[in-house]
Image (cartoon, rainbow, N blue to C red):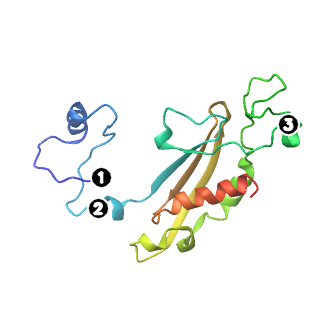
Amino acid sequence: AAVRTACALEGGELRRTLNAYLPPDLVIREASTVHDRFDPREDARSKHYRYTCHVGPIRPVIGRQAMWYIPPPRVKPGKGGDEGTELAANGARTDGTAASMIAPRIDVEAMNEAAKSLQGGPKDFTSLSNKTKEGAKDPHCHLNKVTVTHAADADILEFDFFGDRFLYNMVRIIVGTLVEVGTGR
């Protein structure tokens, strides 16, 4: 964000002062002086977008507004799929293991392989964005890097996008498409 101010404070001093007045869930990480015509959307040299998904057996309570919950696949009672695990009517395992449900089978390697085709550019991302709300005249973006990582201990998938710009809903649509690849749909 950019703000024009007559305040005499600069950089770190301005950041510390503003943070003293902000609520605990909002923080300014960096403040610096820029030229008068600076536009953070147009003048940025690169952008990073992280999209987070929870893929565990139980939907999260904490942080649920900030991530997409992908529930486990529905399995008929008594059938454990290719694992051969018996499931009760409520989805609980009957083999005595600690996990209460089978987490979605997600192939992170396949998602990363598919993400490689998005890298480079500039490429036209019109088909992977919401065209009806897009105000940008140029649908071409250059994605330097796209990665998918799985923190198994936390049942979290992180999708990181690094590029020069993103179209409206582009990352959200790409994540949905990569999840389809990862689940074999």
Write the residue at 10% across / 49% down. Answer: 6
Q: Amino acid at mark 3?
A: Gly
Rendered-image quadrant of the C terminus: bottom right
Write the residue at 21% across / 37% down. Answer: 18
Q: Which residue is mark 1?
A: 1
Q: Under tag 2, what secondary structure?
A: loop
Write the residue at 21% across / 52% down. Answer: 3
Question: Is residue 138 shown left or right of residue 77?
Answer: left
Mark 2 surroundings within 10 Å by alpha-carbon count, few (fewer than 14), some (14 through 19), many (20 or more): few
Q: Nearer the viewer, residue 38 or 23?
A: 23
Q: Which residue is mark 3?
A: 78
Q: Which residue is mark 2?
A: 39
Mark 1 surroundings within 10 Å by alpha-carbon count, few (fewer than 14), some (14 through 19), many (20 or more): few
Q: Nearer the viewer, residue 62 or 32?
A: 62
Q: Amino acid at mark 2?
A: Asp
**Residue 171: % across, % down:** 53, 59
Residue 92 sits above or below residue 54 on the image: above
**Of all residues shown, which one is farthest toward the front?**
89
- Tell me which label, 2 or 1, sits earlier in the chain: 1
Q: CA distance from mark 2 to mark 1?
A: 8 Å
Q: Under tag 1, what secondary structure?
A: loop
